[in-house]
Amino acid sequence: MGRGKIVIRRIDNSTSRQVTFSKRRKGLMKKAKELAILCDAEVGLVIFSSTAKLYEYASTSMKSVIERYNTCKEEHQHLMNPESEVKFWQREAELLRQQLQSLQENHRQLMGEQLYGLSVKNLQDLENQLEMSLRGVRMKKEQILTDEIRELNQKGNLIHEENVELYKKVNLIRQENMQLYKKVYGTRDAAAASIDAFNPYGIHAGEDPQELIQLQLSQPEQDTYETSGSATK
C-alpha cells in the first residue's frame, strides 16, 4: 500500500518535527545544488531552525548572492519609486570606490610597497602570486622569441635558395662564355681564356696586386753597346 498524503501543518511532536526538519532540509539543499549545476543558476539558500540555528547554501558565495539580491531589489524599487534614484547611484559609487581602493592597495603590494601589517601567510600568498605572474611573462617571452627564430630561419632558407639559383645562373653564364671563347681562341686556349674572362687584369689567386705593377729597368747588353761604340769611332 502506498503512503498516505501528509497534511501540511505544524507537527506537534517535537521529535517528529526535528526528524522531518532534518530530512526536508537535506532534500531542499540537494535540490538547490542540483538547480545551480543543471541550470547554471546562482542560488542562495538560508534556513533558520526553530532553535535559531543557521543553515545555508550558496552556489558561489552567500555575500555575492546577497549583494546581487540587494542590487536587484533596489533597481526594482527605483523603477517603482523614482525618488530612490539618488540613493541607488550613491551606493553604486561607493561600491566602485571600494573596488578602486582595493585594486590600488593590491597594486602597491605587488610593487613591494606598503607591506606592513601583512602576516607571513599573506606574504607567502603574495610571493606565490608574483611567481605565477613571472612564470607567465617568461612563457610569453619565450614564445615570442621562438616565433622570431622560426621566422628568421625561414628567411635564411629563402636566402639560401636564392643564392643557389644565382650560383646556377653564374655557372650557366660561365659555360656560355667558355663556348664563346672556344669559338674565338680555339680549343687550346679555351681554359686560359675562360680564366682571363673573369680576371681581365691578369690578377690570379694567391698573388699580390702590388707586385704586379712594379716596374724594373733592364740593363743594356754589353756587346751591343761596344759594337755601336766602335762603329762611331
Image: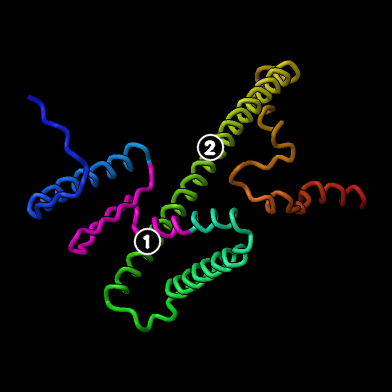
Q: Considering depth in this image, is 51 or 151 the residue closer to the camera?
A: 51
Question: Which residue in the structure is indicated by mark 1?
Answer: 63
Range covered by the magenta-colored residues? 41-70
Q: Considering depth in this image, is 188 or 76 the residue closer to the camera?
A: 76
Q: Considering depth in this image, is 66 or 139 the residue closer to the camera?
A: 66
Query: Residue 22 placed where, x, y %?
Result: 14, 50
Q: Is residue 48 magenta?
A: yes
Query: Residue 11 placed where, x, y %?
Result: 15, 49
Spot the residue most to the right.
Answer: 232
Q: Is 214 left, or right, of 39 in this rendering?
A: right
Q: Is 197 left, or right, of 84 in this rendering?
A: right
* Callout 2: SS: helix
Q: Label 2 sits on what residue type?
A: Gln
Mark 2 or mark 1, which is nearer the start of the sequence?
A: 1
Question: Which residue in the structure is indicated by mark 2?
Answer: 154
- For the point 54% across and 53% down, the residue is 76
- For the point 63% across and 63% down, the residue is 83
- For the point 48% across and 68% down, the residue is 103
Which image quarter: residue 183? top right
Q: Is residue 180 magenta?
A: no
